[in-house]
Image: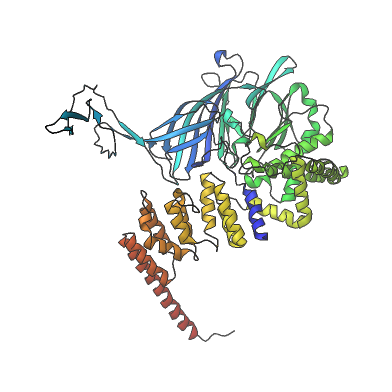
Amino acid sequence: MRSVWCLVGLTLLVAVAHGQDDRLPGESRPSSQRVDVTVYQDDEGERSFTFEGQTSVTAQVVRDTAQLVLHAAVSVSSLTVRYQGGDVIASSYEQPQDGRDFLVVSLQEQEAEGSLLVLDIIFSANIGNREPGFSRYDYQGRNEQATAPIDARQLIAFPVLDLHSYVAEFVVAEGSLLVLDIGFSGNIGNREPGFSRYDYQGRVGQEAVYATQFMPNYARRALPCYDEPALKARYQLNMRLRPKTYRGYRSNARSIYDDELDAQGFRGYYLEQTPPISAYQLSWVLHDVVGRVSSGDVSTVVWQVTSRSDQNGFASYMGPPSVEAMEQLLGVPLSYYDINKMDHMAVPGYIEESMSGLGIITLHYTSEATKERVLGVIQRKAAHQWFGGLLSPSWWNDLWLTEGFASYFQWIAAALVQPSWQLREAFVVNAVLQAAMPADGAPGSYPLSKSPNVSAQQAFDEYFYEKGASIVWMMENITGSEPFYRALNKYLTQKVGPDLKRVVYCYGAQQGGENAYNFLMDLYQTTDIVSELNDIVLGVTCSQFVDGLRLLELTATGAKGGFRREHLQWLLEGLLQRRHTLPSALQFLSGGTNLLSRPDERQAARKLLRLATLEMRNEQMLDKVQQAAVALEDESLVTVAQWRRDVIANGAAARRDAARWLKGKPWRL
């Protein structure tokens, strides 16, 4: 039972989730994205307070698909799809007006005029009664009224169509790298999520700062993107704007800019590429502000509007030690992830108290804030560089992992910065005893891990910051500080990839027994994200309790108790990879190939069996491969099996020769 809870806990960490109306179907994931944006500020005529841009999204195809779906709450004006470094793929796109902000790209195969095509069509229709087409014509025969179908044809004039091309669905294969070149435009908001302007009263009149706020899913309001926390990409963001009084541009990475203006009076700013981050971590600010370089670290700068530049002294002083405290506790410097600067942007009237992007923190400073409050905000956002920036949940139902760790370090790491303030003790009183515990015991209290069907906006809870921090505090106290931070260090440095769920499911199924097997089978029924389902199917095959042959037959026939038919190949792949399930997979291929009735299923089975054969070491299994090869009508598999026999025999002979040679040597110690 302990292993089952281990599986459940690990599953929470990788955040299995599903079912959102605005969640992407999962047929592709981004790897990098270049964004070029031109900003039109005030005094630009009809273009005032708008932006337009061009983005190139490099995406990897996760499964064979004829459609790509990403988010876009901006107007898309053009779109082309091409293989990375290769040919353009014909495509069309649409932005359904259903509130989901989807950009749906349909891939098409286009045949040129003059091509000869064969269309195999199965059809049915009704025989008419004395009407054009194929009809029956009743008449009075000699003895009785008879009915005879007569091939009566009526010539009907149809307009001649000018056929230029034939368009059909085009499927790109799993593993393909595609580039989507998208032109887009949008409006700059006024103090709202997305990309907005923030007006304030300056020394010489009304002025404005232009800033973004993309948390949790508002990046789509500024650019087409994969706007989900689990889908990370390396972003390169370039900006064009007229200098006017706006002298600066800050974003996630360092930037350089053109000394000269272009022909239209714009200056270009060019950023370095970011580490892999979620879209909501993108951030930029256009400003006319004054920067104060920290005396503790020249890479940390606090920026404030000129009229309030005297309010940022303490913040600039606290910036570097807040990051150093996190690095000391975790043993992982930000430079490990190529983060080489930290900008604190004070935006007057910012709609959030603070918002953290990787390498940039946007805040709403007030002169009334106490030093303890300022340090708490800075320390919390410093913690978000690791928890929320470098690591994020797969879906918002486990947002407490991000916010809980950040809230915890808001107190614990700050205690290293200001030891005399007794912040660790204050955390126990303020966060645990006075906030988390009363909230958790109140009627109608919500669990930290919410339903997987929760939306991004529904994920936030008034007290889950303190409750999450309390759980982290309990974990540290149960395990001890040294193991706790050692585990965090290992997790942060092990370069977690998209296959982590697959590893978690397989390990849990191996260790958790029948309960873990049932857990995964139930999880399959409540999950509808394709990438999640594939990993669950492969995880099930790791269990000692799986009846491989029966599960294959149920899945192939669509019977209750099996998987969906489209996951038959994933099931077969997993069973062929495991020593304990290999016999059942070979038995199915030997006697159940008639069930492989869908297009390309037999070819896929041949490929999977060929790969499995190359790893086999058992003569009996190779005999069964030959039986399956006959059923699959593939003589090449027989050849592969025989080649594998020869490899095994040659290896055994070589080991015998080596043993005789070693035995004849006069070894001395």
Left or right relative to 418: residue 243: left
x and y, in percent, of residue 26 in the image: 51, 42
x and y, in percent, of residue 316 in the image: 77, 34
Is residue 569 in view from this perspective? no
Q: Quadrant of residue 638?
A: bottom left
- The residue under the point 55% across, 16% down is 47
Left or right relative to 553: residue 339: right
- Report the number of discs: 0
- The residue under the point 54% across, 60% down is 542
* 494 vs 286: above or below: below
Q: Nearer the viewer, residue 389 or 146?
A: 146
Q: Nearer the viewer, residue 649 or 591?
A: 591
Q: Quadrant of residue 256?
A: top right
Q: Quadrant of residue 101?
A: top right
Is residue 438 in view from this perspective? yes
Q: Nearer the viewer, residue 434 or 424?
A: 434
* 536 vs 216: above or below: below
x and y, in percent, of residue 455 in the image: 62, 36
Q: Residue furthest front?
A: 143
x and y, in percent, of residue 104 in the image: 47, 33
Please identify the quadrant where the N terminus is shown: bottom right
Left or right relative to 654: residue 127: left
* 659 vs 492: above or below: below
